[in-house]
Image (spheres, rainbow, N blue to C red):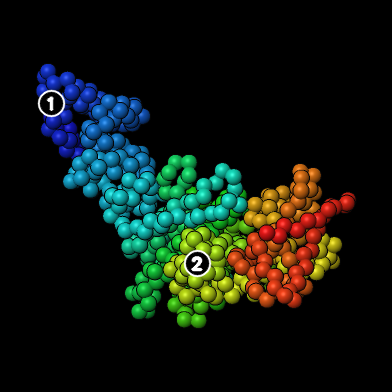
Amino acid sequence: MILRLARILVVALPLGLGSAGPGRAEEAPADAAARLTQEAAALVDQKEFGRALELLARAQETAPTYAPAQEWLAHVYEVLGDKGQALNHVAALLALQPRSQFGADAARRLFLRPPFPRRLSPGALRVSPVAFTVDEGCALSEERVADFPDRIPLCYTTSAKYPDDGLGGGPLVERRLPTPGEGTAQFNRAVYGYREDPETGEFRLAVIAYYPSSVLSGSDTDLSATAQGLVHLALRYRTYAEGYLGLAGQGDAEDINRLWLCTGGPDGAERDGSDIYLYRVLSADRSPLEWLRQLAHESGHLLIPPIGGFAAPEMWANGEVGERLLLHWLADESGRWSRSDWPSSQAVARLDALWPGCGGVVEDYLAASGRAPLGVWAAGGPESELIMGMDERAMQYYVGLVLYVLAAHGSDGLREVVKSCAGTTVADFVYAYRQTVGAWAKAGPLTLGAGGYNPAETRLTQPPAPAALAPPWLALGPGDSVTYPVFLPGGTWRIALDIP
């Protein structure tokens, strides 16, 4: 018997649909599956998709290796617009019948017809006609959120793909730049980045980077590797914010962030809503560190709660905070993957593999400008008049407080302060820190990390390492000294040093 669909596509099912030989008990499940599939096909023709899916699910359960049920399941989910489920059944079909023409055609159609799939199972990745890089994952330390996995696998496309036409209506997207007077930019290539959902095991689309081809930009420079690297970084930055601070991604209605690689526009980068624009991407003036730092800065505006209301250098300080926290966690993870403390040569090489030329300069940034604001906070403490300031030094005071909490109380301590802050001013954050420290003190001994020292009043022969922003230990040599600012609730306290 041959069943033919009357909708959208024609599927020829095997001649063996319901032809199990009499007296062969082991083929009875296939007979039942064939009958259920026939009934489901009739319901599909009547557009009774819900009942059809019920019968097809029974057919699949009755005879898991019965390929026609997978074909019909893939077709019904495609008609319903559920690409993720359709691809799951296409993958199951091709696992049963690797040469299935229906399966090959369906996989190509589901991937290449817009919109690009929003979720992908590992099986769907294996049948994709679009090339993907599957990363071993983003690895987080024990300071992560309690129920957050210690590793989140990532993947992103590595072959040329036209932009999702949900934005532009076709393979060419024209975008008005958010900076007034800068006009529009055009994009005809895209990279799609996914993170694994710990609850389902599926990869969910989280970041899309748009860029012009060399033909469109009129340049000999191929931006595909740059776009892939930025997507990879953005996926990691989102994972750090969620895993360490418990902050959900600030994406669009689909929880997707978009990166726009513009050949023109002003210098630098900026955030607009859930989008990040990187300008003048063909310029040779942007160093490897600047790529990482600018994306981290704008991701900070996107992922970290705003604190400020400053007059200069910008209204909100979450960009400055993002630079330091995200690059710190990136360096820390590089050490974890290389099984050596940052900034070992192995850890630096690991970071260089992610973005060539950045490993050593990231260490310089973290060791110098990364910690500089901590001294501003340590000098004034929670009673400083900078709490009400609006200038750049007031911003550095707040950034220094964030770095102090990270260094003295760890990423998990910083998470508690961030989550308890109910406002958007520096005073709100200082109050949240006071209240959180008070709660910790009531719960038992209060432990402060070795990294929470005042750099302006500390003399170290050996630089603090590992993890320049939050070193777990310091090495003191002859003539060295270290000063720790300690901010405690009122009362009598006994202080003890933990010296191994």
Which quarter of the figure has residue 71? top left
Most extreme residue toward the top is 23
Look at the numbered disc 2 and give the secondary structure of its residue. helix
- On residue 240, the disc is none
Q: Is residue 139 placed above or below 211 in the rendered structure?
A: above
Which quarter of the figure has residue 169? bottom left
Which quarter of the figure has residue 136? bottom left
Placement of the N terminus among the 4 image quadrants: top left
Look at the numbered disc 1 and give the secondary structure of its residue. loop
Classify mark 1: residues with Cα within 10 Å, few (<14), some (14-19) or many (20+): few
What residue is rendered at 72% in x and 49% in y? 420
Amino acid type, callout 1: Ser
Residue ID for mark 1: 19
What residue is rendered at 38% in x and 56% in y? 134
What percent of the width, then of the height, locates residue 65?
A: 23, 33
What percent of the width, then of the height, locates residue 429?
A: 75, 56
Left/right placement of residue 340 relative to residue 156 reads right
User: Looking at this view, is 412 or 427 the one in front?
Assistant: 412
Disc 1 to disc 2: CB gap under 8 Å: no
What residue is rendered at 71% in x and 60% in y? 499
